[in-house]
Amino acid sequence: MRVLVTGGAGYIGSHTVVRLIASGHEVVVVDSFVNARPSVVPRLEELTGQHVPVHAIDLREHDKVERIFAEEQIDAVVHFAGLKAVGESGEMPLEYYENNLGSTLGLLRAMQRHQVRTLVFSSSATVYGDPASVPILEDFPLSATNPYGRSKLMMEWILKDCDTAWGLKSVCLRYFNASG
């Protein structure tokens, strides 16, 4: 399977690239390098022993995203790309909504046009807001309390609609980062 990993040079994305290749998949990376360094790519190739095609673009450049799908013959997508700082999102809400929603919507549009119907979406436990108790359980009410979390929750709703409307098969992974 040929898998597009957006944000594939980031921390979680790069580890996913290594595991996908080790599992026998071909991987194509898209990364704007806003939250990652280009020096990660040679390290990925060293670790995997394979060339990793990388497209250094912003996913909001929809014509470039479209070209990648036309040229790379993608079968599935793992979507990690996005702005990710809770505090910063409160200071820059428009940037977070524009980036996180705009990039994902363009990605979904290209997937639909090229009949790519498998997506793993990197969401966040911030979609639960301030839970009544911990540990947080998956069936707790959703109520994000910041622009970052709301952008993730909006995308989860959009993905459910796409699952229903055009047969997208999506799964949302919510990360629980512990401190201490």
Image (cartoon, helix red, strand yellow):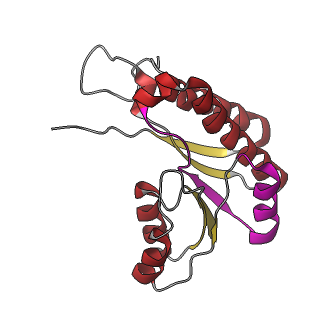
In the rendered image, which quarter contains the N terminus? bottom right
Marker count (numbered): 0
- Is 147 drawn above or below residue 177 in the view shown? above
Inspect this view and state whether residue 87 appears. yes
Q: Quadrant of residue 92?
A: top right
Residue in the picture at 66% in, 32% down: 98
On screen, residue 96 above or below 30: above
Front-lying residue, 105 or 160: 105
Question: 56 or 130, which lies in front?
Answer: 56
Query: At 57% across and 76% down in the image, what residue appears?
Result: 52
Asked if residue 22 can be seen in this view, the reply is no
Q: x, y (%) of residue 174?
A: 43, 38
Q: Pinpoint residue 9: horizontal percent, then vertical percent.
A: 49, 62
> Farthest residue in the left direction?
180
Q: Is residue 49 left or right of residue 106?
A: left
Q: Percent position (x, y) of residue 168? A: 70, 45
Residue that sits furthest to the front in the current view: 91
Q: Outermost residue toward the top?
A: 132
User: Which of the 4 quarters of the picture holds residue 95?
Assistant: top right
Q: Is residue 44 left or right of residue 2?
A: left
Q: Is residue 153 left or right of residue 132?
A: right
User: Quick one: quadrant of the C terminus?
Assistant: top left
Residue range corresponding to the magenta coloring: 60-85
Q: Nearer the viewer, residue 157 or 95?
A: 95
**Residue 158's x, y, as percent?**
67, 31
Check residue 62 for magenta coloring: yes
Magenta span has 68? yes
- In the rendered view, would you say 82 is above or below 151? below
Identify the residue shown where x is 65% and y is 32%. 160
